[in-house]
Amino acid sequence: MLRCTPFLLFDGICAEAMAFYHSCLGGDLTVTKLGDTMMKSHFPPEKHARVINARLTSGAIDISATDWMADPARTPLLGNLSALYLTGGRVELQSLFDRLKDGARTDGFQELHEMPFGLYGQFYDRFGVQWIFRGEQ
């Protein structure tokens, strides 16, 4: 089933921010740090304490987040700290990806590809909106 939720990006304070939102909104919070995943070997040790994925669910509220780990040439700024996060099956994600990427910016563009946690891709569309796609393994 295809879902679209907000996705927040932080610069090293994701765990703190999501814990605060959890204290305000209640529900269930899961936090996975980079150092607890197979991906840690692809990053320097100083990034291992950063959050690779956090998810807060409380009733109809569903928020996902991460700490900034993008290209060091890009700086986290207001405007690039949120995205639309599409999750679902391979076929439906590929179809939406192919339609939405029309006119997408080339900087930061990642075609849908397999990662240790499943299918992944991202881009900024022609209107400057960031889209992140994740499919089941």
Image (tube, helix red, strand yellow):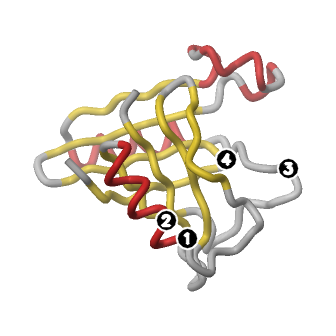
Percent x, y of residue 14: 54, 42
What kind of element bears circle 3? Answer: loop
- Residue type of the residue flagged with mark 3: Pro
* Nearer to us: label 1 or label 4: 1
Image quarter in which the C terminus is found: top left
Identified at 26% across, 54% down, the residue is 3
Q: Is residue 66 left or right of residue 40?
A: left
Q: Nearer the viewer, residue 11 or 42?
A: 42
Gap between marks 4 and 2 measured at Cα: 25 Å
Please name the residue that numbered disc 2 is placed on.
98
Q: Which residue is mark 4?
A: 68
**Mark 2 crowd level (few <14, some 14–19, many ≥20, 10 Å Cα):** few
Front-most of 28 and 116?
A: 116
Mark 3 is surrounded, within 10 Å at the Cα level, by few (under 14), some (14 to 19) or many (20 or more) other residues, namely few
Horizontal arrangement in the rendering, residue 106 relative to residue 52 (left or right): right
Q: CA distance from mark 2 to mark 3?
A: 27 Å
Residue 98 percent coordinates (x, y): 49, 65
Residue type marked 1: Lys
Q: Amino acid at mark 4?
A: Trp
Q: CA distance from mark 1 to mark 4?
A: 22 Å
Q: Residue at x 58, y 56 (%)?
A: 122
Cβ atoms at labels 3 and 4 below 8 Å apart:
no
